[in-house]
Amino acid sequence: MWVGHDAEDAYRFMLGLLGWMLEGLDDDGRGRALDALRATIVAHDTDEGEVYPSATWIISARRP
């Protein structure tokens, strides 16, 4: 899953999607969460941007 052109781009994108998860954290907890987010984004840096491996199962069914 591609999340940004570079670490800063991906950081803004992820905070826009998941920033609500930081609600209710104290300043220390919020700081640790943001540091962890930056670390995982940087760990997924590639020549093509910030990329996380992902997979999807698509299941369909029909009633006989």
Image (cartoon, rainbow, N blue to C red):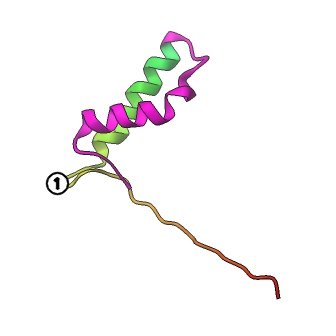
What is the total number of numbered labels drawn onto the structure image?
Answer: 1
* Of 10 and 61, the residue lying toward us: 61
| Residue receiving disc 1 | 47
* Of 30 and 59, the residue lying toward us: 59
Q: State the image quarter where residue 32 is shown.
A: top left
Residue 21 % position (x, y): 56, 29
Q: Is residue 55 left or right of residue 13?
A: right
Bin the neighbour count of mark 1 within 10 Å (Cα to Cα): few under 14, some 14-19, many 20 and up.
few
Q: Amino acid at mark 1?
A: Asp
Residue at image coords 41%, 25%: 34
Residue 53 % position (x, y): 39, 59
Residue at image coords 57%, 70%: 57
Residue at image coords 41%, 36%: 14
Residue at image coords 48%, 65%: 55
Q: Is residue 40 magenta?
A: no
Q: Is residue 26 left or right of residue 61?
A: left
Residue 11 % position (x, y): 34, 33
- Residue 23, placed above or below residue 27: below
Q: Which residues are magenta?
A: 1-27
**Secondary element type, mark 1:** loop
Q: Main secondary structure of the magenta part?
A: helix
